[in-house]
Image (cartoon, grey):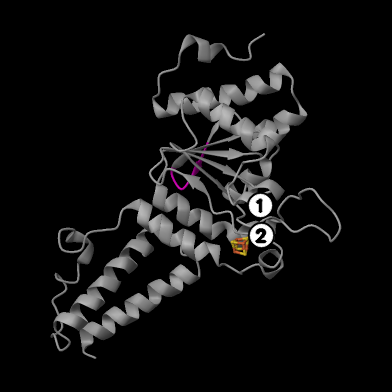
Amino acid sequence: MDTFDKALKITRDALLSIQDGFGKKPHASLQTLEILKSATHHVSRKNPTASTPSSKSLNLPKKPAKTPLKPPTEILDSLRKAALICTKCPHLASTRTQVVFGVGNPEAELMFVGEAPGADEDAQGEPFVGRAGQLLTRIIETMGFTRQSIYIGNVLKCRPNMPAGTSGNRKPRPEEMSTCLPWLREQIAIIRPRVLVALGATAAEGLLGETRPMKELRGKWLEYENTPTLVTYHPAYLLRNQSLQEKRKVWEDMLLVLEKLGHPISKKQRGYFLS
Ligand code: SF4
């Protein structure tokens, strides 16, 4: 193995360790890893005894024509495949039906983030498919989107386990969310949405580390890694509190999202849930 091969191996191992340890800039690490994989493959196949290249030739990301990057769809699919076999939380891995990775457009401009899958999501493998999910779908469609045009994911990818013999769902614990958060960070880094919406206080805590009450969080722009992020009520809250006033609060948050994205808002849309 010559110097170049050694340098590539060291860099590749370092990136793999970042990937395993869920690095802070995952999109970059994944893409760079792909480049290095192909570069290593290319060098070893084409000329196993190639001499050490100049530093200029090591500047791989500036040569897209020779080393094309994979589209977000493929990168996200690779990430999904890795997440589906994750066992970092043994107590969740042993009780889940399946990992609920996320659904939607890998290049979505808008991404909704919830807290964790419930029983329905665990059974179907898709986030937000129960009653609260159906309400979220109505909100999304009233905004002018479809579930396929945006992206929906959770902070926790596995259903929080329940004591034996009990039903229902529980909130994810902070340590469970922090263990799983790197998967979501990877998703966001690949999708690169223009706007994020955190659904509920638990999602806001998991994604942003925010522990302030909802009345202080909602309705104003926060940031996740320079991405404008809005916190609003979880749709399950609206199922419990069906007053026009609470529905209007969530809808006003969604109007803020549409404005931020520069989407036209009709007079009818502006008037929803006003008494
Ligand atoms: S909750 Fe997340 S980190 Fe834990 S096992 Fe499931 S996918 Fe892995």
Q: What element carries label 1?
A: helix
Amino acid tagged 1: Ala
Q: Is residue 218 left or right of residue 236?
A: left
Q: Which amino acid does label 2 sit on?
A: Thr
Q: Picture coordinates of residue 220 (x, y %)?
A: 56, 30
Disc 2 secondary structure class: loop
Q: How far is the residue under mark 2 from the one under mark 1?
A: 6 Å
Label 2 neighbour load within 10 Å: few <14, some 14-19, many 20+: some
**Is the magenta region chiefly helix, strand or loop?**
strand
Q: Farthest residue toward the right?
A: 165
Magenta range: 222-226
Is 137 placed above or below 49 here? Answer: above
Q: Which residue is drawn at 57% across and 27% down?
A: 139
Verify whether residue 37 appears in magenta. Answer: no
Label 1 CA crowd tier, 10 Å (few <14, some 14–19, many 20+): some
Q: Is residue 234 visible?
A: no
Above or below 113: residue 13: below
Residue plotted at (53% across, 59% down): 182
Residue matched to label 2:
97
Q: Residue at x 56, y 11 (%)?
A: 271
Image x and y of residue 265, in percent: 45, 17
Position of residue 164 measured from the top left corner of the image (x, y, whole percent)? 84, 61
Nearer to the camera, 47 or 51 = 47
Question: Quadrant location of the C terminus?
Answer: top right
Q: Give the labeled residue for mark 1.
A: 123
- Do labels 2 and 1 touch, CB within 8 Å? yes
> Can the viewer see residue 159 in this picture?
yes
Residue at the outermost front position: 124
